Image: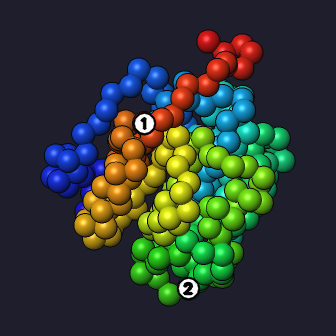
Amino acid sequence: MNSHVRPWWMARSQAVVPRDDLVQLGSEAGAWIVPLSLIGPESVVMCFGVGGDASFDLALIERTGCRVHAFDPTPRARSFGQQTAEEHPAFVFHEVGLWSSDTELEFFEPAREGHVSYSATNLQGTSKSVRCPVKRLSTLMGELGVDRVDLLKIDVEGAEYEGLSGMLDDGIRPGVLGVEFDQPVPMRQTRKMLDRLRGEGYAVVAIRGWNYTLVRDDASRVASEPEGQA
């Protein structure tokens, strides 16, 4: 299936709610669309799935003055994340993944040699794997000492359903939510999760391929912007 073609039921049932503050940040491969008026220097930003591209994270830091907590436990992402953190102090790298419990999982290698993205759900049907730590979002928030998340980005090769379920079950409701619904999965699974998010007060505000940006109805604009930003 073409990863940029959405099925008919998504085009029909997931109407996009327009906003005037949406900006696309990052490289062509790593871009996300976010409402910049909701993110500022004091915002709590957690991004899961670094891979080998932190262009979105770094652009968000530059535009808003925020700190980004970035998470990825997989082998090829770790060295990249560590190096990026050394070069950019506001990019804080954590060698752990997102799941619905605190445990260790087998992460399966990508099918194409040299690719970065390992999958805990074995999306690509490979046989070689490594064990990596994963944690519930609530656990990670406790470790960071935060009681809210203003922007949560999830690009975790099939683990998004487990991570989102744990988040919602724990009553955590980020103001801005970016999720890549990795393929292939049964379409009903993606539809069910989107319906659940809508029922929790989220509206889809942007779609780029399978990258969905959602905003909760009680999300507030930040009080001020960092110095030098228009």
Q: Within 10 angstroms of label 1, few (less than 14), some, or many (20 or more) residues?
A: few
* Residue closer to the observer: 29 or 22: 22
Mark 2, other Cα within 10 Å: few <14 / some 14–19 / many ≥20: few
Color scheme of the displayed model: rainbow
Name which residue type carries label 2: Lys
Q: Does 227 appear above or below 103? A: above
Amino acid type of the residue that numbered disc 1 sits on in the rendered structure: Asp
The residue that appears at 61% across and 51% down in the rendered structure is: 47
State the quadrant of the C terminus.
top right
Residue 175 coordinates in the image, percent (x, y): 53, 40
Taking the spot 68% from the left edge, 42% from the top edge, the residue there is 44
Q: Which of pointers 1 and 2 indicates the residue nearer the eye? A: 1
Please identify the quadrant where the N terminus is shown.
Answer: bottom left
The numbered disc on residue 128 is 2
Q: Earlier in the sequence, mark 1 or mark 2?
A: 2
Q: Identify residue for label 1.
A: 217
Q: Which x, y percent locates residue 97?
A: 63, 66
